[in-house]
Amino acid sequence: MELWQGLWQLADGLERALRGESLVAAARLRRGRDLVGAYEDRPPHALDITGLLAWSTHLIDELADTTRDPDWVPPVPRLRMP
């Protein structure tokens, strides 16, 4: 159950980042990262958990950068391992 809740938190964080809600987006991304991080050693469904963790950390850092371009668009994560 935590995996799906974590994925939802990551998706919601991305949506809020797209809307410009940086503080809420970062909080959702942190929560999602914490939940899905528990699956890094044994990723289910061929999910790229390591990639999702790196993506969410990068996005959280980008959201904290107050000097970023106003036309900035958050990167979309890869969900499955190649």
Image (cartoon, helix red, strand yellow):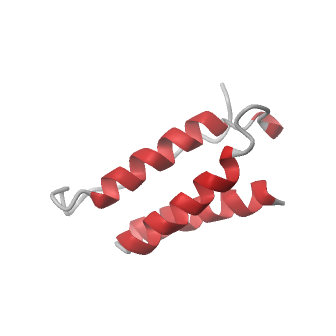
Say which quarter of the image contains residue 43: top right
Q: Residue furthest left?
A: 67
Image location of residue 40, percent across then percent down:
70, 36
**Residue reaching furthest top?**
82
- 12 with respect to 82 (left or right): left
In which quadrant is the N terminus drawn?
Answer: bottom right
Q: How many marks?
A: 0
Q: Residue at x 44, y 64 (%)?
A: 26
The quarter of the picture where residue 69 lies is bottom left
Quadrant in the picture for the C terminus: top right
Q: Position of residue 39 (x, y in %)?
A: 75, 41
The quarter of the displayed image where residue 41 is located:
top right
Q: Is residue 76 visible?
A: no
Residue at 79% across / 33% down in the picture? 42
Could you tell whether 46 is left or right of 12 in the image? right
For this view, does 46 lie left or right of residue 19?
A: right
Q: Residue at x 82, y 39 (%)?
A: 45
Give the side of residue 19 with respect to residue 40, left or right: left
Residue 2: percent from the left, percent from the top? Answer: 78, 59
Residue 16 visible at all: yes
- Could you tell me residue 58's position as x and y percent? 40, 45
